[in-house]
Amino acid sequence: MMSKKKKTLFEKYGDSENVKDALIPERGKFRKPTKCNCGNVDYTTLAYVTKKSIRVMDNLAKAVVSVEAKNKELETLYAGFLKTANELNEKLTNEVESLKDDWNMCDAACDAKCDEIKKLKKEITQLNKRLEVMKHVN
């Protein structure tokens, strides 16, 4: 039974700029590990792999800090945008309420004028009737 070769981190996450920057060696080529006579990995290869691992961890930490800084910047930008939007929304709500109050006041004044006009029309019809009576009497 053959074991499948695992994909490298670069093959898995090569599309991500942050991971790509962290995984690409800064200088030199990757050195194949060597084994000593007893079949174990020798000290220099182990030290080399450890240094490379530390370099990758350092690069990943820098990438995380970079992403956090960008997110913090966007968070402050969005917070300012939301604050402005909420202030504008509150202002517009107050304006709508003011217009509703003005509408109600105008509606009440219009109703009062309509009642006054009805009274005047009744008075005019009564005066017209009196005038007709006076014309017939004279």
Image (spheres, rainbow, N blue to C red):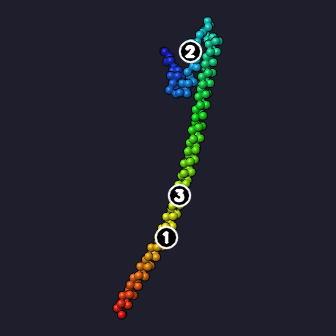
Name the residue located 50 percent from the left edge and 22 percent from the top edge: 11
Mark 2 to mark 1: distance in Å?
A: 89 Å
Q: Nearer the viewer, mark 2 or mark 1?
A: 1
Instruction: Please say if the residues under marks 1 and 3 sit with CB atoms less than 8 Å apart.
Output: no
Q: Is residue 82 above or below residue 59?
A: below
Location of residue 83 in the rendering, given as x and y in whole percent from the top left corner: 58, 47
Residue assigned mark 1:
109
Residue assigned mark 3:
95
Mark 1 to mark 3: distance in Å?
A: 21 Å
Q: Name the amino acid type tagged 2.
A: Lys
Asked whether, in this view, residue 118 is left or right of residue 101, the answer is left
Q: Which mark is residue 42?
A: none
Q: Nearer the viewer, mark 3 or mark 2?
A: 3
Q: Earlier in the sequence, mark 2 or mark 1?
A: 2
Instruction: Please say if the residues under marks 3 and 2 sit with CB atoms less than 8 Å apart.
Output: no
Extreme bottom residue here?
138
Extreme top residue here?
37
Asked whether, in this view, residue 79 is left or right of residue 116, the answer is right
Callout 1 secondary element: helix
Callout 2 secondary element: loop
* Mark 3 surroundings: few (<14), some (14-19) or many (≥20) residues within 10 A: few
Location of residue 50 in the rendering, given as x and y in whole percent from the top left corner: 63, 18
Q: Name the amino acid type tagged 1.
A: Ala
Name the residue located 57 percent from the left edge and 19 percent from the top edge: 25
Q: Is residue 54 above or below residue 81?
A: above
Mark 3 to mark 2: distance in Å?
A: 68 Å
Location of residue 78 in the rendering, given as x and y in whole percent from the top left corner: 56, 42
Residue assigned mark 2:
29
